[in-house]
Image (tube, grey):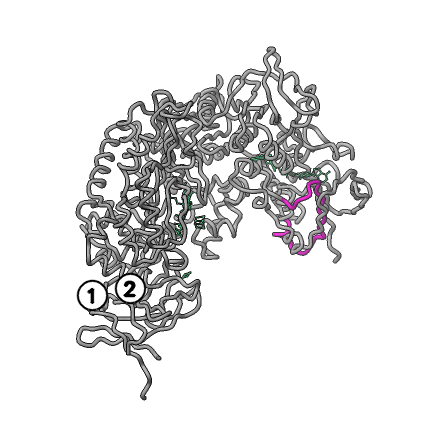
Amino acid sequence: MEKTLRRVLVGNYEDLPEGFGKTVVIEDQEVAVFKLDSGEIRAIENKCPHRGGVLAEGFVSGEHVFCPMHDWKISVKDGKVQEPDEGCVQTFETEIENELVYLLLKS
Amino acid sequence: MPKQRLVLIGNGMAGIRAVEELLKRKPNQFDIVVFGTEPYPNYNRIQLSKVLQGDTQVSDITLNEWQWYEDNNIRLYPGETVINIDKEKQLVLTDKDRQEAYDYLIIATGSNPFMLPLPGADKEGVTAFRDIKDCEKMIEYSRKYKKAAVIGGGLLGLEAARGLLNLGMDVDVIHISDFLMERQLDRAAGELLQKELEQQGMNFLLNKSTTEITGKKRVTGLKFKDGDSIDADLVVMAVGIKPNVALANESGIEVNRGIVVNDYMETNVPNVFAVGECAEHRQMVYGLVAPLYEQGQALAKRICGVDDKGYQGSVLSTQLKVSGVDVFSTGKINEDENSKAIKLYDEWNGVYKKVVVEDGILTGSVLFGDTKERTKLLSFIKKGARVEEYLESTSSDESESDIVASMPEDEVICGCNGVTKGTIVEAIKTKDLTTLEEVKGHTNASRSCGTCKSLVNDLLKLTLGDEYSADQKESICACTTLTKDEVIAKIKEKGLTNTQQVRDVLGWTSKGGCSKCKPALNYYMGMLNPKGYVDEKESRFVNERLHANIQKNGTYSVVPRMYGGVTNSDDLRKIADVADKYEVGMIKLTGGQRIDLVGIEKQDLPSIWADLDMPSGHAYAKGLRTVKTCIGASFCRFGTQDSVGMGVDLEKKFEGLNTPHKIKMSVSACPRNCAEGAVKDVGVVGLDGVWEIHVGGNGGTEMRKADLLCKVKTSEELMEIVGAFLQYYREEANYLERTSAWVERVGIEHVKAIIVEDKVKRAEYYARMEEALSVIKEPWKETIENPTLLRDLYEKVNVAAEAK
Ligand code: SRM
Ligand SMILES: Cc1cc2nc3c(=O)[nH]c(=O)nc-3n(C[C@H](O)[C@H](O)[C@H](O)COP(=O)(O)OP(=O)(O)OC[C@H]3O[C@@H](n4cnc5c(N)ncnc54)[C@H](O)[C@@H]3O)c2cc1C
Ligand code: SF4
Ligand code: FES
């Protein structure tokens, strides 16, 4: 099961804001990291499948984020765009260790 | 059995309705041919007034699309006129030499506008107001010319005049009688109407009879019997209609004023029927659609062999389709020696009511200013109710919905389309209808003039019971069934202090809310409790959270305040330096008289604000945007007031305020209105010694011209009125409702009553405004001084490329 996963540090669990996303920039890719009201951490591609809106700045509700550009509703769990719109964004695994939040990227 | 051949002459409202009635009863029995002089499918003539007034377009008033004719196998010959009827051979002949044989013939040729036979009536620029062509002509003239004269102060003339005003023309209305709409109103109501319309900008020449239309090829003016004259580039004649009976007459069908018909709409010639405005029934010729539709039914029943008592004549009622004016009249409008009237006249509020009683029975009524009772009165008068019954109903405050409950099933609800209560109720039940739109779609009710909307809603309420209230009212969003007012009441009642509590306690279906209710709740709670409520960053749309406008590529824009559009060299220098230092994408002058720095990275925002050291322009906010000003009295040769100073004061006073939607203001120093006050939420215009305050204007998606709220003398009064107005708007409007939509919804008169006329209320609203203003902080400064905000909102996490 050995996969080359690259682990990058996002920051302190405590320091992550609740209710909106954090933008993580990795070279030319951006990931939106969310701390949900359940306390879970979720990470998705920071680019709306509609027209590239920055999802990290959207309204967060439960397990969904509303894109700030044209209000598409996207699941931060599985990356699926909710009806009536269609599409999906890439999701990323995260890890919490010693109060630190990491993002797992395939390299 | 071969199909029966049915020919219809006149592709208008009455004829097509008769055909619809036929098809409803016997769908496949007829071979139908329709001739119409006008080159369009059947359209809603009534709505021409609305087209002229700019509320709808010609393309939206079609009643039966081309497809409808095809779907029903109707051969339509648009633009073709029938010129002869051969009643012996049962044939019609058209101007295109077409012959068509019939088993049944329906004549529905409508009316012709009556054109006064004045010298000059044939000049260019003289028109009637009857069809699409006339309407287009008036619109075209309004683009080129300024002065219009409408001859005729009746229903049609006034609707035309209102339309021409909306098209930007100066309008004189010439009327032969000494008060308006004398056929439908009595003097008191006619005079109130005149006052209202004068306020809207119409000019009246009463007691005037026109003797000549002057000009060479084109109209240039009118001359009157008393020697007076006026200038006019466009003359609209709206002095009445004449049943269009020439064809019937020439073909030997009996004609009096109209084509004479019996209760089954049969003429004296076998198999020939007449319906609509061209028909005369029991010496009556009608000029409104309600009776025509009843006639269509009687006709269809006859042809289909249904046993029926036939058409019995109609009680008419009148309504004027001019916004801001409520008039209604029905039945007998003037009392005489045999009758008495119940009257109520409130000159102050412009409300008038008269109910005419004959031998204890209601026979007619005129209402002005407040027409809420119209349905009740119409229903009472139709059934010949006794005055006691009426008086009892007014004292017991019987509501509109009680009225619909007590109506018989066959009572007509939608007069225009002849839809009965029974039909509507049945459609609601069998087709599971829950909204007005659905009822419209399924029954035709409310599809024409729209004045029966409230009755249809009452029927929905009555039929659906509890389900109705849940369905009709507009909830805040899909997470709840509660309306804004209900939510606000509950927040107050239960002392809720944050949006999560509201969602939990009030049973939101989505725990975290949605993009609609989050910012709305946050706004309402801050408005209700300015001092105690803690604003929630997570309930703010990104622009208001970050105090910058997000752009399509995820960068932001920075717009510093430039009070009243006035700047100085220091500020310009700072802006230029910042632009260089941060390599901004574009420096742009905005439509709001200030400068926009575009294309800025999020993480640079705080340091740019620090470098600029200028207050935020709130270009992103649901709050005060700009106060646009003109040069004003200090420099301009026309200026009467210090518009710049006033603009700066207003902007300083209200900057940072949270409002349901954005607010734009302007101050001009004379009526030339260079700062465009007519399209601002608050547009102030200075005149010599007074300020005019206009509100509810909008220049965006839905243009709306501002209404005059009042005139004031001093800047203190101005500040108080504007403050109270904005506070009233803050408290009453729905979130994301601009002042334009809100003023349109509640009516300027209502706003005036609270803010201008009621000094106590005004002071209360102003005091609450002061409280709201007292807690405002400058957001850019607040942000750069708060490390947590900087970290949470503006910093991105940058992962170095080589990290493993
Ligand atoms: C910058 C500016 C255009 C310009 O370069 O001149 C502008 C830019 C935007 N306008 Fe505007 N409007 C600008 C003046 C106007 C005006 C003219 C005016 O204010 O004099 C109007 C029509 C007047 C009015 O509002 O009555 C105007 C009517 C709108 C509307 C339609 C509002 C409506 O109620 O119909 C929107 C959409 C909205 O607010 O929902 C809008 C929305 C926007 C947004 C914020 C779009 C958005 O939501 O992201 C634009 C931001 C672009 C960006 O990337 O920064 N903008 N916008 C102007 C800023 C003025 C300022 O100094 O603050
Ligand atoms: C601006 C305006 C506003 C109005 N507002 C209201 C209102 O608010 N409420 C209300 O109840 N009523 C209103 N009316 C009146 C209403 O529109 C008419 O009562 C109704 O349209 C009459 O219908 P009709 O079918 O009898 O005549 P029309 O709709 O006039 O139809 C007759 C048709 O027959 C055609 N025709 C005539 N002769 C021939 C021929 N020989 N061969 C072929 N075709 C022929 C004509 O071109 C015309 O298209 C309004 C009218 C106008 C003009
Ligand atoms: S008109 Fe306004 S909202 Fe539309 S593109 Fe231009 S700036 Fe953007
Ligand atoms: S870019 Fe996200 S909804 Fe359009």
- Image quarter of residue B653: top left
- Location of the N terminus of chain B by quadrant is bottom right
**Viewed as shown, does residue B626 lie left or right of B85?**
left
Q: Amino acid at mark 1?
A: Asp
Chain hosting mark 1:
A
- Tell me the magenta residue range: B22-42
Q: How many residues crowd mark 2 within 10 Å: few (<14), some (14–19), many (20+)? A: some
Q: Residue B533: x and y, percent? A: 19, 49
**Does B41 appear in magenta?**
yes
Q: Which residue is painted at 62% across and 16% down in the image?
A: B223
Taking depth in this image into account, of B485 and B556 the one nearest to the observer is: B556
- Image quarter of residue A102: bottom left
Residue B328 versus residue B33 in the image, above or below: above
Q: Nearer the viewer, mark 1 or mark 2?
A: 2
User: In this figure, which residue is indicated by the disc labeled 2?
Assistant: B796
Q: Residue furthest top?
A: B227
Q: How many residues crowd mark 1 within 10 Å: few (<14), some (14–19), many (20+)? A: some
User: Callout 1: helix, strand or loop?
Assistant: loop
Q: Residue A36: x and y, percent? A: 26, 67
User: Callout 2: helix, strand or loop?
Assistant: loop
Q: Which residue is painted at 58% across and 24% down in the image?
A: B149
Residue A15, labelled with which disc? 1
